Image: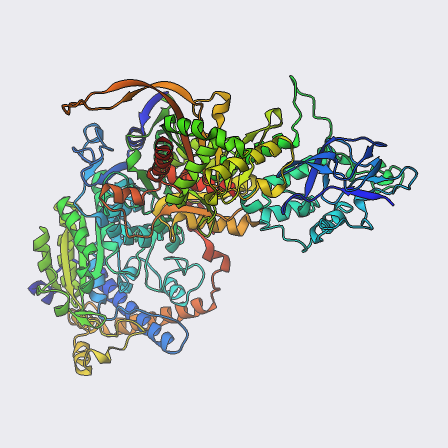
Amino acid sequence: MEAQEDLQVDLSTESLLEMYWLIVLSRRLDERTWVLHRQGKIAFHISGIGHEAAQVGAALALRRGQDWVVPYYRDLALMLALGFTPKEFMLGVMGKKGEPSSGARQMPSHWSLKRMNVVSHSSPVATQAPHASGIGFAIKMRGDDVVVLTSIGEGSTSQGEWYEAVNWAAVHQLPVVFMVENNLYAISVRQERQMAVEHVADKAAGLGLPGVTVDGLDALAVHQVMTEAVDRARSGGGPTVVETMVQRMTPHSSDDDDRSYRTREELEALKAQDPLDLHRDKLLAAGILTEEAEREVQARAKREVDEAVAFATEAPYPDISEASYPVYAEDRRDD
Amino acid sequence: MTTEVIMPKLGESVVEGTVTKWLRHQDDRIEEFEPLVEINTDKVDTEVPSPATGTILKLFVAEGETVNAGTLLAVIGEPGEEVPEAPPAHDEPDTPPAGDRDGEVQTMAAEASAPAVPKVGGEDLGFISPVVARIATEHNVDLSQVSGTGSGGRITKKDVLTYVEGRQTAAPWEEPASGELFRPTEEIFGKKPSAAAEPAARAGTVLPLDAVRTQIAEHMVRSKRTSAHVTTLMEADLGRVISHRKAHKESFGREGVNLTFTAYFVAAAVEALKEVPIVNSSWSEEGIVLHKAANIGVAVSLGEAGLIVPVLKNAEQLSLLAVAKTLNDLAERARGHKLVPDEVQGGTFTITNHGVSGSLFATPIINQPQCAILGVGVLQKRPVVIEGMSPSGEPEDSLAIRPMVYLTLTFDHRIIDGAIGDHFLGIVVQRLQSWT
Amino acid sequence: MTEMTLIEGLRQGMDEELERDARVFIVGEDVGPRGGVFRATQGLYEKYGEDRVVDSPLAELSIVGIGIGTALYGMRPICEIQFADFIYPAFNQIVSEAARMCYRSGGEWTVPMVIRAPYGGGIGGGLYHSQSIEAFFTHVPGLKVVVPSTPYDAKGLLKSAVRDPNPVIYLEPKKGYRLIRGEVPEDEEVLVPIGPARLSREGTDLSVFAYGMMHHYCLEAAERVSQEGIDTELVDLRTLKPVDRETVLASVAKTGKALIVHEDNLTGGYGAEIAAILAEEAFADLDAPVRRLAGPDVPAMPYSHPLQDWFMPDADRIADAIRELAAY
């Protein structure tokens, strides 16, 4: 972890600033969505606040558009890094026509973006993990120069589906990186009630693959570990479990009230190490980000969020007829 | 004063009858109770005796024609008396003959005048399925005119389609054009077109289906479709029956009774029915109906005219003498077409003596709604192995010539399991072989 | 024409598709050198190698889950579930993932895959090697469900299923694997489209609808009652989803009576769907109540021979049901 202190990382200034921009944009979009919910303008939001640094650190370790991504619902920052736009996100939040993940059929934050090789996932947790291994299996069968990243919460690694998926990848040495975003809570249940091991990464040993735990509040640290894992996968070295220690700074979703299971003091302590602040301070200290540039980033983020909300508010709802298709592949239409 | 002869209603469910033969002709003299006409219905062939003494003034229905119960067949009176001119079958007769003119007959007669009016309400036609209702509406069918062959007499899709087809081929003129110019002659002259139209020409000789043949065919096929027929076969040594008959034939004869072998089979069957009452039953949707009385049908061949099965009622209460006596009476009147409808109804078990025509054994068809039928083969002397024992206790078999008969029990496997059928037939055999 | 068994037809279908399309591969338990516990994939490992005929870990969920992933990447997996009874761990992947993928992504992602499963009883398989599972899946939009009953259909439907762009559940009447023989042409492409049912016996008195092994028992029963003058029409449904409404309705329009036979449990079984279609769309054609003859509502087929016989509809029971309906 010493490497990040002096920013001795294999990242350009542009990449470091892009990371910051994505963290800020994701945070502002996320916050605005909470506001829309509390204003009664939308039905649901599931938040990624506190996970952003880990997600952008992982995203920049990929060849975006070439590698495949099988995400889960807290991955707003990851998706923005992969080219999902604020307008597209807001169309989904409001259930408007043309939303790219599902045509507004799924709840918000249930990602899919074919143009960036992001595969659709569902709400039952860990169901996406076998798909990632299957994609890895196909990549290996074809001999393509492609890696798969799949993400998941720590609670979901209790599911048999996750174990089966990781097992398959390990057995066949598949080019898959299993990223775990460990925020210690599965809705209300803490990690101690999910697993007996100290780290999710410890589970990897039992399945015969490397497991690494990294500070998920540090985008640069995540980027470094993730780069190693991706390189290993790409070079035929097989899969890796990468556990990023993140923090969930909000309730589970817009329908949750976390006061019943964690103290306000605990929450205040999380704010003291907000990954957004940590990354900004690091860039400011290194002289990569100026105060002026910081103001510009914030203003641009606010503008893009405002535009996205206005765009989505004006956008039409899907035609009722869209609810009836495409059940089968042959039902697909061009519109 | 004239007297009307009408088509009697022979049995509860009988709605029509066929005039098979006029025994007297127009202008003949006839005494009251003298046979006038032979008729055939679903249930029975019979002679209708004249209701009065006088001259037959007019016959209204030709031989071979089928008419509804209540239809005027003939008028008897004195020469010179006026005969009704209007088509009598289509009118309400002024003087309904006593006993036969119940509500149902009136309904039938009234409907005959308006066959094309779809039936709404009224009499109970049984369950009408959706498709039957649809076809009836589409083809303007009066369902009361359609006889049902389905479960419980229900009108099936096939029944109504057959009716529609038959109506179309027999009488296309029943649906005339709307103009007044060409009116059907039947409408003008009032005669109902005969159902017995010329059969379509076919290769070879076509024997027309008379009513008896049609009914036999229908009953046989229905039974085969209804019951799961299974036949079990055993043989019986009739030595003791023959001895018994020889010893008692004369004394029975003094009572005016011809002691036939059939009487023994009836008596043996009745005893078996008492021991195995499930054989004396009928299938129904609610369950298996066990009959109290053993009413034994005994098939009587009428030669070319087919077959009739008079019923020996409450046979369980009859002695061998009474059984023989009743059998004599029924058979005689059956051959003379003099059975009344009740005498061919209500059977619970049937015996068929196909041995009379030389048959060794057969698998007869169950007489619905009964569940079993006993088939009796020809009585034949056959070599039989008699198992014996020497005085010293060693097995010592011998060959003997015995009067043997094959007996079959054909039963409805829905009701009767194989072992039970065998048990029943075994009792019959045992009873015959141990007759005293 | 070559006479072959149902399992040979199936195997030939897989062989031809593996040969035709490099994207096609087989994955399942013991499908490799062992050739499958029923020998359905016998010889294919030797012919196509371990990359195309893949022995999976003993985990049904991931057989299907991995299959979905490969399909998303463009492969054409044939996933074998060793016994239909073992499919439930994969239920979530089939129903919640494969079936919903196309709809939930607005058509962006599709899952062209075949999930094969030997099903049905009468082989002494007891509760967990005898189950019929079709009704669970015919309920699910996004899935197709086929059940071949002849070697020809086994081959033709398998090949069509491999080429279909959707997840197809392909149920194999395992009792008939070697019991059912039939002609399959040698020199032509055998493709049986998914959808149309097959009128396997024309008749006028009543319609019987069946599939899989029950179709053969129905055929036997129909021949038997024909000697009693009952003229039975028999439809081999063979594609359960999507159901061939036209054939079902046309047959009942002709006969007016319908009997549906399956060995799956009665309640909520596939027969209920056919009965509902007839009640809704053929009411005015019905001359009798629609009848179902099905396995009893006990959890599954017992092992002991007489108990198994009690469960399985057979030609005797079917003939009785036909007679009863014909006499109505």
- The colour scheme applied to this rendered structure is rainbow
Q: State the residue at coordinates (22%, 74%).
A: A249
Q: Quadrant of residue A11?
A: bottom left
A86 vs A151, nearest the viewer: A151
Q: Quadrant of the N terminus of chain C?
A: top left
C210 lies left or right of B177: left
Q: Is residue A55 above or below residue A296?
A: above
Q: Is residue A188 above or below residue A220?
A: below
Which residue is the extreme one toward the bottom?
A: A265
Q: Is residue A2 above or below residue A134?
A: below
C289 vs C210, nearest the viewer: C289
A251 vs B426, nearest the viewer: B426
B6 lies left or right of A30: right
In the rendered image, residue C180, in percent from the top left (x then y), is placed at 32, 30
In the rendered image, residue C60, in percent from the top left (x then y), is placed at 22, 47
In the rendered image, residue B200, in percent from the top left (x then y), is placed at 70, 25
